[in-house]
Image (cartoon, grey):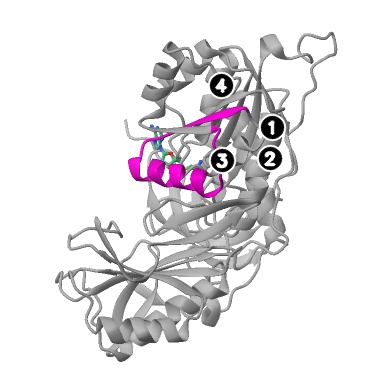
Amino acid sequence: MKKILPVKKNDEIEAVFEDLTHDGAGVAKVDGYPLFVPRALPGEKAKIKVIKTNKSYGIGRLLELHEKSPYRVEISKQDAHKYGGCQLAHINHEGQLKFKENQVHQVLARIGKLEGVRIHPIIGMENPWHYRNKAQVPVGEKDGKLIAGFFKPRTHEIVDTDESLIQIPEVNEAINVVKEVCSKLKIPAYNEESHKGVLRHIMARYGKQTGELMVVLITRTAEVPHQKKLVDAIVSRLPQVKSIVHNINPKRTNVILGEKTKVLWGNEIIYDKIGDVKFAISALSFYQVNPVQTKVLYDKALEYAGLNGNESVIDAYCGIGTISLFLAQKARKVFGVEVVPEAIEDAKRNAALNGITNVQFEAGAAETVIPKWYEAGNKADVLVVDPPRKGCDESLLRTILEMKPKKVVYVSCNPATLARDLRILEDGGYSTVDVQPVDMFPHTTHVECVSQLILNECNPILNSSEPKKTFPIQARLQ
Ligand code: SAH
């Protein structure tokens, strides 16, 4: 029998919000039935319109706010284009931090069923604006001019943006200059529907420590029209540019970058530094986008690894070797593994660039390579994982439980899969001692955490008679 829901589509009701979902929508309940309403906040009362109902939840639209949260910030219509990609722009930084911290607490308790874990207050940024060192913006045309910015949520309509508040000013400037120069040279924008035109995306990357800039032009065509004039104009207007790269993407696809890349001017790479370690970054390499918080995150990972120089360390999911090289400064030997072969080439090059010789990198899936190392007798004292959003492969977790490194440091960009994986490690003989959330992406819903796990057999606190401390769920966003 069909259940009768307390609301139906197009109903307009007065709602009281009590929580936020992990993607930042307000949650109001009507007779226990949850309604998710984007941009509503806990503690607020509002008139809403029900726009969709499912069996277990409904979606609503905010019509009129009657009581406002103290964490709410108003954004004027004129400024809205500066907040592209900021799902939490309507919450002030303090509120955002509470939301993220609270999410970590809730998820670790609900999914991980973890007790006695020290979840530290989230580390926010002193200045949470203009932090991104990279932008890749879609290009379109309007009234005979090029426009570039971000897609309006859930559409393919480009909002023209001359200043993104989360990008480093040099990155904003690079995008604006390239847009203007291409517009003057009448280089046509790519048109998704007709699959005609030329310029698909403009990308800019900036080394915050070195001041080096890379510009990448992504086109459908194999050639860039007016290449010489374009390059000359970019070089003269952007003195920090060290590399101009052309990437060709001839396919009908939402994927931004194509397979072919050629250098139009300057170097193939730019350099940046995190702490004392120097990195070469190419157009296609993965590199953390918030350099200030990356340092905070890696320092925490290093602190949790607790190295004294005698350890053998494995860095699984090592990318271009960023964490591996950080760890190598304090360990006897570091072994890095990563599934993208080009990233491993970058990692080797980065080791050489820094004269770091106590690292070894191998391309392959962590869940295949680490068991092979283990069988060959390579047993790590400390194991670091930094997997993508889907978390660790379960077979890798099983290998960790067999290998029994004394410590596991888990760097995670998704609290839900972190909680799931910590539960498996806990059941297999580890204790999660510390979890440190770090706000790597202010104004977005993303939360990064670094966690320290200790093998129970080696944990002096567990083996003492002191009672285990528990930590209550902290302040909620109310
Ligand atoms: N530690 C790096 C990269 C983290 S991003 C840094 O901080 O920069 C996660 C990385 O895991 C990506 O580089 C991705 O290519 C890699 N990856 C994804 N699945 C993998 C797998 N099964 N085995 C090894 N690496 C994998």
Residue drawn at x 52%, y 26% is 421
Say what secondary structure mark 4 lies in: helix
Residue to which mark 1 is pinned? 304
Front residue of 116/238: it is 238
Q: Are marks 4 and 3 in contact (CB under 8 Å)?
A: no
Say what secondary structure mark 1 lies in: helix
* Farthest right residue in view: 466
Q: Are marks 1 and 2 in contact (CB under 8 Å)?
A: yes
Q: Nearer the viewer, mark 4 or mark 3?
A: 3
Q: Nearer the viewer, mark 1 or mark 3?
A: 3
Front residue of 42/335: it is 335
Residue to which mark 4 is pinned? 423
Q: Nearer the viewer, mark 4 or mark 2?
A: 2
How far from the left and from the top, in percent, is residue 3? 38, 35
How far from the left and from the top, in percent, is residue 436? 68, 39
Q: Nearer the viewer, mark 1 or mark 4?
A: 1
Q: Are marks 1 and 4 in contact (CB under 8 Å)?
A: no
In the image, the segment drawn in magenta is 332-358
Q: Which of the numbered marks, if any, corresponds to residue 356?
A: 3
* Residue kind at label 1, given as amino acid type: Tyr
Q: Give the mark nearest the N terminus, 1 or 3.
A: 1
Say what secondary structure mark 3 lies in: loop
Residue to which mark 2 is pinned? 300
Q: Residues within 10 Å of mark 2 (few under 14, many from 20)?
A: many
Q: Give the mark nearest the N terminus, 4 or 2.
A: 2
Front residue of 411/361: it is 361
User: Cα distance, mark 4 to mark 3?
Assistant: 35 Å
Residue drawn at x 58%, y 32% is 410
* Residue kind at label 3, given as amino acid type: Ile
Front residue of 370/150: it is 370
Q: Is residue 209 above or below residue 32?
A: below
